[in-house]
């Protein structure tokens, strides 16, 4: 989930970045992945610009998220996400291991 969150939100290359920031529908966008013992959830959000209709930005965000099904992530996106934030991914994995080991 961490890698997918990075693929969607990375500054400059993320899918949501391109659909919301580059089109000036939002001034910022983000994603946060809950690192749990079992598969969890990811939270995505954006700060919408004053002059943009909230509905337009929301529809763009939802369309971008839905497109992951019809346009799966590529090997290049996965590799870029892993390179882009290795410290964050390692910290997330360590946190997951700590929680898992603590439950045993």
Image: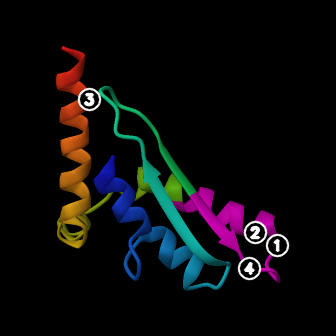
Q: Give the labeled residue for mark 4.
A: 49
- For residue 52: magenta? yes
Mark 2 and mark 1 residues within 8 Å of each other at the beta carbon: yes
State whether residue 102 appears in this view: yes
Q: Which residues are magenta?
A: 45-64
Which color scheme is applied?
Answer: rainbow
Say above or below: 96 vs 79: above
Residue 71 found in image quarter: bottom left
- Number of marks in the image? 4
Work out whether mark 3 precedes mark 1 in sequence or the reverse, and give the earlier one: 1
Residue 32 lies, in percent from the top left, at 45, 53
Say above or below: 22 vs 74: below
Assess disc 3: are there few (<14), some (14-19) or many (≥20) residues with their C-alpha within 10 Å of its C-alpha.
some
Viewer-nearest of discs 1 and 4: 4
Q: Give the labeled residue for mark 3.
A: 99
The alpha-carbon separation of the residues under discs 3 and 2 comes to 39 Å
Viewer-nearest of discs 3 and 1: 3
The alpha-carbon separation of the residues under discs 3 and 1 comes to 41 Å
Q: Is residue 52 left or right of residue 47?
A: right
Element at label 3 = helix
Q: Give the labeled residue for mark 2.
A: 56
């Amino acid at each position: 989930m961490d890698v997918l969150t990075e693929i969607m939100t990375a500054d400059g290359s993320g899918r949501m970045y391109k659909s919301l920031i580059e089109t000036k529908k939002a001034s910022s966008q983000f994603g946060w992945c809950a690192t749990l013992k079992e598969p969890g959830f990811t939270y995505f959000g954006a700060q919408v610009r004053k002059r943009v209709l909230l509905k337009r930005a929301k529809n763009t965000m939802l369309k971008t998220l839905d497109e992951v099904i019809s346009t799966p992530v590529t090997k290049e996106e996965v590799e870029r996400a892993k390179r882009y934030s290795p410290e964050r991914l390692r910290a997330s994995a360590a946190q997951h291991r700590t929680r898992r080991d603590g439950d045993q």
